Amino acid sequence: MGRPGGGIIETIIINVLLVFMVLLVLALIRTRNLFAVIVLSGLYSFLMATVLVALDAVDVAMTEAAVGAGVSTVLLLGALNLCKSEEAKTAKRPWLPLALSATTGVLLIYGAMGLPDFADPQAPIHQHVAPRYLQNEVDIPNVVTAVLASFRGYDTLGETTVVFTAGAGIIALLRRRKRDTDAK
Amino acid sequence: MSSGGVIEHFSYIVTVFLMVAGLFIVIARGNLIKKLIGLSIFQTSVYLLYIAPGKLLGGTAPILAPQYSIYSNPLPHVLILTAIVVGVATLALGLALAVRIREAYGTIEEDEIVARDNAIEDAEGAGS
């Protein structure tokens, strides 16, 4: 609502950003140097955060910029420090994976064409449970926080379990390494 | 009201492209770190799949204020907040595995790892 033509400009901004993402991923596929690949993937995460801001998902954008672009890049660079930085060139052309990916893509696009239009206010996603969330039942202005903490708290419990398991796994993997080197 | 045009479904098409590109990197590239980056691109495309349908043109971020009446759907945002953290947890675990493989095999290229495994099996088969 509000300014006339605002919807068209919003659509153009979002679509241009999405085209940037496609170009960035194509560059990422072709790049062989792993350091460049990691920098490109950090760039990709920041671009994704920008798209999320344009799609009104500001909380998700903040998390993606901090966790996706920040922590992931640091982890990848740390792993790269321990490994070789150049990807070997595969001898054979990847025709089979290309055919498989293209087939999957065509099938998924065929299915996606049956989904509701972009930003259609009559779509089921806007009619089912969202209007109730937007009534501000728990008296917190940020609806995302309200839903996260009060309606869907079990999600965060599950998330914590996953993070704990992953952390325990990493410690188990990397501690064994230290003992091995001590033994040698 | 679904007219089914390409312009109206452009966000879905880009989502599918990103997903398939991630899948292609995971299958076709032999380097383990590159495979993990492909996996995280696949995960990131899912964020777009969830959040793009929740957008309303002319709407604003779901932070309630008296001067606005249209808000984008907050539920996908909540779900994807969880997914981002889980994605980083899987990436970290995968990288730890890659580092361990590098320690054991001296390489993170899939072809060389398989070749070494086969060589070890052949040597055992010849010895017994």
Image (cartoon, rainbow, N blue to C red):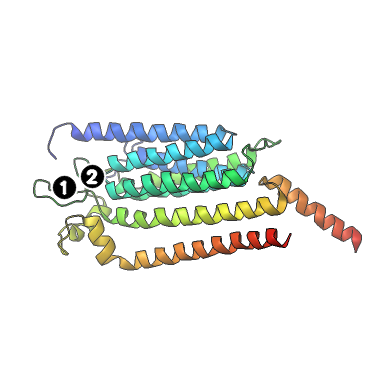
Q: Earlier in the sequence, mark 1 or mark 2?
A: 2
At numbered mark 1, what does the secondary structure look like: helix, strand or loop? loop
Q: Position of residue B11 (x, y in %)?
A: 36, 40
| Residue at (24% x, 31% y) in the render | A9
Residue A136 visible to the viewer: yes
Does mark 2 fall on the same chain as mark 1?
A: yes
Circle 2: is it few (<14), some (14-19), or many (20+) Cα within 10 Å? many
Q: Is residue A47 left or right of residue B72?
A: right
Q: Position of residue B121 (x, y in %)?
A: 81, 57
| Residue at (15% x, 59% y) in the render | A135
Q: Is residue B75 above or below residue A16?
A: below
Q: Residue furthest right?
A: B127
| Residue at (35% x, 64% y) in the render | A156
Structural distance between the alpha carbons of marks 1 and 2? 8 Å
Find disc 2 in the rendering and name its residue: B56
Where on the picture, by quarter, is residue A146? Answer: bottom left
Q: Is residue B31 above or below residue A129?
A: above
Q: Considering depth in this image, is A101 or B29 the residue closer to the camera? A: B29
- Circle 2: residue type: Leu
Q: Are marks 1 and 2 in contact (CB under 8 Å)?
A: yes
Q: Is residue B66 left or right of residue A60?
A: left
Residue A110 visible to the viewer: no
> In what quadrant of the picture does the N terminus of chain A appear?
top left
Q: Position of residue B42 (x, y in %)?
A: 48, 47
Q: Position of residue A134 (x, y in %)?
A: 18, 57
Where on the picture, by quarter, is residue A127? Answer: bottom left
- Circle 1: residue type: Ile
Q: Considering depth in this image, is B117 or B101 the residue closer to the camera? A: B101
Where on the picture, by quarter, is residue A140? Answer: bottom left
Find disc 1 in the rendering and name its residue: B70
**In which chain is the residue bearing label 2?**
B
